[in-house]
Amino acid sequence: MQATDGTNTAFTEQPVQATINGMTLAFNDQGTGLPLVFLHAFPLNRTMWAKQEEALASQFRIITLDLRGHGESDAPLRHYSLDQAADDVHGLLDHLSIRQAVFVGLSMGGYILFAFYRKYAERVTGLVLADTRAQADTDEGKQARFEMAQIAYTQGARAIADIMIPKLLSPLTIHTRPELVQHVRAMIEGSQVSGIAGDLMAMAERPDSIPLLKRMTRPVQILVGELDLPTPPSDAKLMADRISHAHLAILPGAAHLSNLEQPGPFNESIRSFVATITK
Ligand code: MLT
């Protein structure tokens, strides 16, 4: 949300920034112990993970970052790709001297984890794939992305927030939790059009990751809101059936942004998953 002085009121702390692959990226780095790296959804930013930072930073080292194009990171007008996003995450790990981590990616964050795994599997201790899917876009899906990019270009981020909010949150959340809705709106409206359009093109050209699933040998926790419409439980089950070390949990009462709508069960699932891979 832009305040009158131009600051983004969704951010409460002074960000830490690093130059990675020629871009300034903003991130939070809290706690000590096993590193957990969180990748946000489209078109949000790292503040979507505030409840995870709050609950988990006493036990783990929690890294959240604004992917390029979002939040307080650079958002140049140029070609975006999910491989490039994976390279940015890899660059940040090197910057922080983190050899291996557990990665949590929600929706677009999950798509980036597939790209990351293809390139840098040796850096992965485990993966949490939340409200995401392995399939590439259909032709209609790609077309819808190009139309949305055009809307972002002609009408701005506010129009994108109007379109996205009913897809991201359940009707009950929209009617009963105005602060949460406002937070999601602020994240979307705080994104630059270059980043929104860039991500839409990047997601449209992402490859099918289904062939990768059988080759994924690290432990995987799959999470999905039972009411998720963009990436429904059937997509989560498809991944769980094909990954040999996957465990699936369906979170009641959550739609697409399950970590925001049901943070308690979401955090507990992460805790239990990490306990199984570190014992
Ligand atoms: C997201 O939440 O990141 C998006 O819904 C992903 C998508 O549009 O495929």
Image (tube, helix red, strand yellow):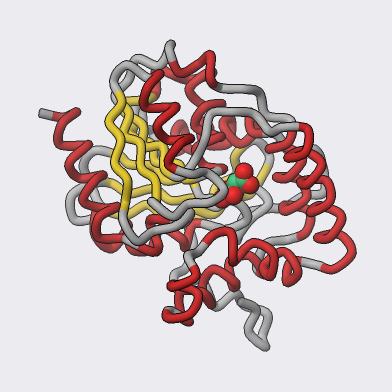
Q: Identify the residue at horizontal 78%, vertical 47% (top origin).
A: 144
Q: Identify the residue at horizontal 68%, vertical 33% (top origin).
A: 137
Q: Is residue 158 visible?
A: yes
Picture coordinates of residue 62, whole percent (x, y): 33, 49
Picture coordinates of residue 64, whole percent (x, y): 43, 51
Q: Quadrant of the C terminus?
A: top left
Q: Is residue 67 visible?
A: no
Residue found farthest to the top: 215
Picture coordinates of residue 241, whole percent (x, y): 37, 22
Marker count (numbered): 0
Q: Quadrant of the N terminus?
A: bottom right
**Residue situated in front as seen by the camera: 172 or 244:** 172
The answer to whether residue 225 is above or below residue 86 is below
Residue found farthest to the right: 154
Q: Identify the residue at horizontal 63%, vertical 49% (top origin).
A: 24
**Residue situated in front as seen by the camera: 73 or 253:** 253
Asked if residue 4 lies left or right of residue 153, the reply is left
The answer to whether residue 58 is above or below residue 111 is below
Picture coordinates of residue 163, whole percent (x, y): 69, 64
Q: Identify the residue at horizontal 45%, vertical 18% (top origin).
A: 213
The answer to whether residue 179 is above or below residue 23 is below
Asked if residue 247 lies left or right of residue 120, the reply is left
Residue found farthest to the left: 279
